[in-house]
Amino acid sequence: MALRQAVAALPSAALLLPPLLLAVASAGLSGYFGTKSRYEEVNPHLERDPLSLGPAAARSRLPAACAPLQLRALLRHGTRYPTAGQIRRLGQLHARLLRRSAACPATADLSAWQMWYEESLDGRLAPQGRRDMEYLARRLAARFPSLFAARRRLELASSSKHRCLQSGAAFRRGLGPSLSLGSDEVDIEVNDSLMRFFDHCAKFVALVEENNTAMCQVNAFKDGPEMQKVLEKVASALCLPVEELNADLVQVAFLTCSYELAIKNVTSPWCSLFSEEDAKVLEYLNDLKQYWKRGYGYDINSRSSCILFQDIFQHLDKAVEESKSSKPITSPLIVQVGHAETLQPLLALMGFFKDDEPLKANNYVRQAHRKFRSGRIVPYAANLVFVLYHCDQVKTSEEEYQVQMLLNEKPMLFHHSNETISTYADLKNYYKDILENCHFKEECELPKVNVTAIDEL
Ligand SMILES: *[C@@H]1O[C@H](CO)[C@@H](O)[C@H](O)[C@H]1NC(C)=O
Ligand SMILES: *[C@@H]1O[C@H](CO)[C@@H](O)[C@H](O)[C@H]1NC(C)=O
Ligand SMILES: *[C@@H]1O[C@H](CO)[C@@H](O)[C@H](O)[C@H]1NC(C)=O
Ligand SMILES: *[C@@H]1O[C@H](CO)[C@@H](O)[C@H](O)[C@H]1NC(C)=O
Ligand SMILES: *[C@@H]1O[C@H](CO)[C@@H](O)[C@H](O)[C@H]1NC(C)=O
């Protein structure tokens, strides 16, 4: 703190900070990268040992009499490269800095930085993303040996995006030949209606995706006082007039800091433009967008995921039925690879990470301790796992089927009980309304202008 104050009082000294000091100062930013966060941010023990099951493993122990019947894992793809649009904007920003570098010696580090991203990388899975998936597969297999080690069928589905297909293949490779899941070549079923339901939901597309007004809180925050302060600081550090910068360019600079850490494990000179306070503001901007586009902002965001929700419970039902009639379980392992945009709406539909107040442009300070922090919920390789157990009961009247949910390998508390395990019956009862009334087709239909006229055609 003392250092930052001294630096603020002496801007010219700040610009001459040795690189080592800058690196130390920027190390604290990685907790604010939102959806561009590394998976290690939510599971720091993996930095020491990527195969460790971590401290949470002990807490999730079940009664010895329970055996897993079915595991469904919904994954976000691993670490990816920036999209073509982000790369283009970064190229423009970098070129502008190079032109000014003679007049702004303080940005020497940034001028020396090589623009190595090419537009063709366009959101593809990075080598780190493959490692994210391989290690995740190995940890899940270690946690549920009876499901993964036995010669069981693995159903692997994915969104059609290249990074998801590659993530699915990497996950499969992580399980290795020793796991006897059949041949190493695995068919990945592309299923965008499950993994990219948002694209197929006409009401979501019209009301949110293609509607500028829908993002009014996000846009208001971009023009608000918190962002303005960040803009002025960054402009001054880059020796640019503040009019030449805008929220989108500042975001690109911050994104680059996050990408360089996630993809290359380095603290890039781009990070030195931001303090921890700036990072919190930019994290909030990212969360606002997630909130209004994928979270509680509009009902249709979460309702569009009904198709996935229903599919999960249909498979659980089927496994319970098969178990009751002593049949083998048709789908013991279901792994599906999608996006942050796949997981976030489903978690909202199920009521997780909901704050008392909505996230808005004007309540940044009041939301400092919000639950809705994308970086904690959907970092790269985020995973939501449903596990169905069959439990031998001493008393026959007790429910035999139990369910656990793990988010990023940590057991979640069910809202109806505050426990990390629930009977399947209680869980279904808690979500009765969604199970009975949430159907993709009806939810996603655009309101018809004149129903009668169409009916009579
Ligand atoms: C996608 O999954 C849904 C639900 O399981 C299923 O009804 C549909 O047939 C699948 N689509 C494809 C293309 O496999
Ligand atoms: C766009 O969003 C605004 C704000 O939610 C809403 O009032 C309006 O009806 C939406 N427009 C369309 C075409 O859905
Ligand atoms: C990333 O860099 C840090 C610090 O330089 C190092 O300790 C760590 O082992 C690196 N991680 C990986 C996965 O290379
Ligand atoms: C769960 O715990 C929270 C906080 O302790 C409490 O407010 C809530 O009422 C509890 N819910 C149930 C269903 O017990
Ligand atoms: C709907 O269409 C019918 C048949 O074309 C017409 O008689 C009726 O006035 C229309 N209603 C509205 C509300 O536009």
Image: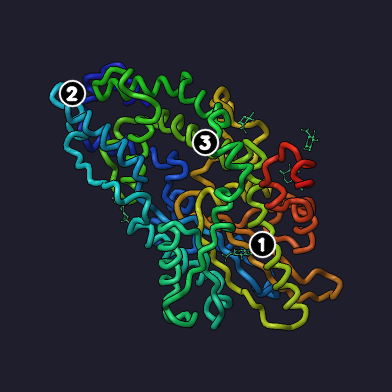
Q: Which mark is residue 104?
A: 2
* Ligand number 4: quarter of image: top right
> What separation in Å lies between label 3 and label 1 (alpha carbons)?
27 Å
| Amino acid tagged 3 | Lys
Residue 211 coordinates in the image, percent (x, y)? 55, 33
Answer with the quarter of the image where residue 27 lies. Answer: top left
Q: Amino acid at mark 1?
A: Asp
Task: Name the residue: 50% across, 33% down.
Answer: 284
Image coordinates of residue 428 in percent, x first then y, are 77, 59
| Of the pair 377 and 210, the residue shown nearer to us | 210
- Pointer 1 residue Cβ closer than 8 Å to ligand 1: yes
Whether tag 1 and tag 2 are in contact, CB under 8 A, the answer is no
Q: Residue at x 71, y 83 (%)?
A: 327
Instruction: Out of 408 and 434, give the one closest to the viewer.
Output: 434
Q: Nearer the viewer, residue 365 or 13?
A: 365
| Residue 311 tag number | 1
Percent position of residue 410, x then y: 57, 57
- Left or right, 160 with respect to 115, comes to right
- Mark 3 or 1, nearer chain start: 3
279 and 293: which one is in front? Answer: 293
Q: Give the crowd class for mark 1: few <14, some 14-19, many >=20 residues within 10 Å.
A: few
The residue at the point 54 percent across, 53 percent down is 196
Quadrant where the N terminus sits is: top left
Residue bearing mark 3: 289
Residue type beneath disc 2: Cys
Disc 2 to disc 3, C-alpha distance: 34 Å
Q: At numbered mark 1, what does the secondary structure look like: helix, strand or loop?
A: helix
